[in-house]
Image: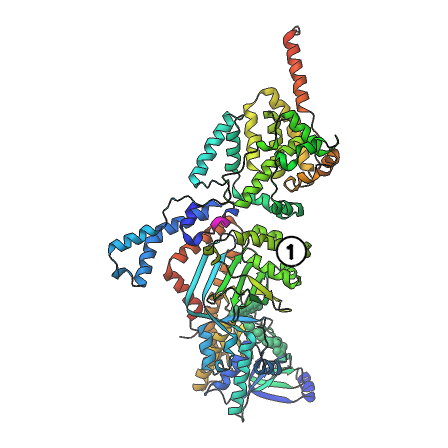
Amino acid sequence: MFRRFFATATKGANLVSDVVIVGGGPAGLTMASSLKNSPILRDLSCTLIESGDITSTLQDYYADPPETILNRCVSITPATIEYLDKIGAWKFVKKARTENYDYIHTYDGLTGAAMEFDSPDMATMIENFNIQASLHQRILELNSEQPVNPLDLRDNTKVVKITRDPKTSWPIVQLSSGDSIKTRLLVGCDGARSPVRKFARIESRGWAYNQWGVVATLKYKDSGFRSPTGWQRFLPTGPLAQLPFPDSWLSIVWSVPPELAVVLVSLSDDSFVTMLNAASRLSQEELDSLYDLARDEPEKLKEEAEWRLGLFNDNLTAEQEEKFPPMVESLVPKSRGRFPLKLSHADDYVDERLALVGDAAHTTHPLAGQGLNMGQADVKSLVSTLEKSRERGLDIGSKFALDPYYSERYPYNHAMLGVVDKIHRIYSTRSPLVVWARSLGVDALNNVPFVKDLMVGQVSHMKSTK
Amino acid sequence: MLAQSRLGKTALRPLVQSRNLFFLPTLASAATGFFLRDSIRLANSLEDNVNQRKSSNDVILEESEIKPYFSRPAKKYPNHIPLYPYEKVAMFVTSAIGAFLHPEKNQYIVALGESTAIPPFLKRLRKQMLDDETGRQILKDRPNITSTSLDLDKLAALPENTFGRTYYEWLKREGCSPDTRVPVRFIDDEELAFVFQRYRQCHDFYHALAGLPISREGEIAVKFFEFLTLGIPFAGMGAVFAPLNIRKSQRDRLLTIYYPWAISSAANCKKHLINVYWENIMEKDVNELRDELGITLPPDMRELRRIAREKRRALQANPSPTP
Ligand SMILES: Cc1cc2nc3c(=O)[nH]c(=O)nc-3n(C[C@H](O)[C@H](O)[C@H](O)COP(=O)(O)OP(=O)(O)OC[C@H]3O[C@@H](n4cnc5c(N)ncnc54)[C@H](O)[C@@H]3O)c2cc1C
């Protein structure tokens, strides 16, 4: 092992860094800005490794944002915004490209039972790139403020291998550039397939939801002013979420079985729009027929779906109309994408000189829009744990110093994953008994404001630390 | 249906009825709404600070603006007669008893048909139409079968081997007309009402294809065949209960000849019959059509009955000597 280390070391530089962050996604960039923003931690040397080309793409986005809303979007909570603001990144967010919505209309595809949540400023829709670009700007700003010890951001660089120093047992990351970095603390913000977690041999438990999330950016028909509303219809094939953006833009996450995801993504733009409108309104039997048509005779889909929608809309009273999202008019070309959905939770978030953050530690179904928010709360917790141990003079990389992060975050994340999983299960069934019980439950809940507020409170205002 | 419309927010509840336990959520939401409505209203008004400023008269006035529990909902199509659930139950019970005791009275049969055509079954039928190109076309065209729409004179002029002519001859022999079918009135969803009307109007085509008469016996045989191919519960009830109430010789004929025919034809049936656009295939060769659909021609029921009758008469005229 020593020989191999020696051998690679001869090719590139042999570096040392107090903290190495793997991954420049939302979690990694937040981690980096937060460390450099902390008066207690900012003197630590810190490197971020990202395989993708982020500095130029994020700079381009920031300098000249695209005309349309990008397809990767998230719903973030006030707690997340508060934190991004605290670390100085929120001011760089392009606010005109975000939408606050204080009303989410959830309805049941089989029974029509509806539940409305509203609470001031419940959530904000934002493009992932908007978050990442503003964090990047914040990092540039912090680096210019502290030119002696800047964050070393290395993109277009992949972590190809991780080993431990045989003597000190510090992790050593080997980079695709040939360099290697030995570190006191390795932070894995490297997403669901986390190489860092694999290196640490931390077991991640869970299961794949037999669903893919189809995402896309679309535009509503102009139907006069409607206050920004999120819509989520629970269909037995999976939830369909329509989330609002300014200027009648919307972003969707349409969770469906993998076979159906393939079909939906391959439809023509027009047919996809019609199918989407159908899925937000028509009955399950009608949808089942349309899905078959979409698979077998896609050229006929548009006409048939429009016929069914016409029938449906003709029978709708003005009052009922309010219970459905507006009709979608068009799809941004090439904006469709699909992502496998799974539940996973790492047994541990920390090890000697190693911590996992964000999707590297846990993944969840997007139906509650919590994945990224949970990662933000992880960063907040980990950074404050590091601050405390630094103040007490502990070695920040020791498992002992890192443990409070795990014990603070694990139970909360576990509960969240569990609740989301239960909701997913309850709604993915066609079993009449469950369907009945859930409608009863939803109707009862919708009638008791107190319980609902509690639920909204749980979802949007829960603070990650005491 | 009605319970729902009084809870404004569940006005879209008809979707519910696709489930087998279609009535439970309705009942449940009605119950929850009922038990909680006062406390919810009170809580809401307390929250909004309205209650304090109002006299109790105002509150009573406001309450009276809430929709009355029993107001008949609006018609969904011209012939529609919206019923309360209890009325539907009453209609089912009376028509079932009536149909059993007086199967010759059309009104009972019609009412029984409609009260058992509950949405889950109709939705299944509609689903089968939606899954088929012709079925969808029928749903779009909404054809109504009448003697004018079919143009009986034209059918009479068709060559003998055509389906249209066969149907015409059958009408003539049985002395009936496509206009005798009663319009659907009690089914609440407009499209499902059409589906049921279509089912009802196509019934005579099966008779004609199989050459079965509209006597009680012939009716039972066709109903059984319909039940097996279309899954209409009413037809199945007829097939199970009606034979209890007929002469033994008729029952024997049904059990040995016509039920087996219905079972084998239904098993071989190649196309869902609700998806056959009968009006458009009048000129088709009738045997070709039977082959295409996989339906065989059963022995002529009238003929069998005539033979049986003659035998009986012969027996009565000169009873054979006891051995
Ligand atoms: C369809 C969908 C909808 C969602 N909607 C919401 C929502 O509404 N609200 C919400 O809060 N969350 C949502 N999420 C979840 C959210 O997107 C994720 O939780 C979040 O993006 C995770 O961020 P991360 O930084 O932890 O991981 P990632 O974004 O996966 O980032 C990991 C990074 O690590 C890099 N990397 C990996 N391996 C290496 C390596 N070997 N070397 C170098 N770099 C490496 C990758 O290139 C990547 O940039 C949704 C997810 C999906 C799929």
Residue at the spot of label 1: A301
**Which amino acid does the dot numbered 1 rest on?**
Leu
Asked if A71 appears above or below A239 in the picture, the reply is: below
Q: Position of A370 compared to B203: left or right?
A: left
Which secondary structure is most common in the magenta stretch?
Answer: helix
> Helix, strand or loop at disc 1?
helix
Q: Is mark 1 within 8 Å of ligand 1?
A: no
Query: Where does the image place residue B113, in percent across and percent down from the top left?
Result: 53, 35
Look at the image and say whether residue B13 sits in the magenta stretch: yes
Residue B128 position, x and y percent, is: 62, 45
Among the 4 quarters of the image, the one containing residue B9: bottom left
Residue nearest the viewer, comparing A133 with B66: B66
Which residue occupies 47% across, 34% down?
B92
Q: Nearer the viewer, residue A412 or A440?
A: A440
For the residue pair B263 and B109, the one nearer the viewer reads as B109
Categorize mark 1 by other alpha carbons within 10 Å: few (<14), some (14-19), many (20+).
many
Give the image quadrant in which the ligand numbered 1 is located: bottom right
Can you say which quadrant of the picture contains the C terminus of chain A? bottom left
Q: Give the x, y percent position of residue A400.
A: 48, 79
For residue A294, above or below residue A349: above
- Residue A266 quadrant: bottom right
Q: Position of A85 compared to A251: left or right?
A: left
- Could you tell me if residue B215 is visible in this image? yes
Provide residue B277's location: percent of width, then percent of height. 66, 41
Residue furthest to the bottom in view is A148
The answer to whether residue A44 of the structure is visible from this angle is no
Q: Quadrant of the N terminus of chain A?
A: bottom right
Q: Which residues are magenta?
A: B12-16
Residue B106 vertical position relative to residue B57 in the rendered view, above or below: above
Q: Nearer the viewer, residue A454 or A67?
A: A67
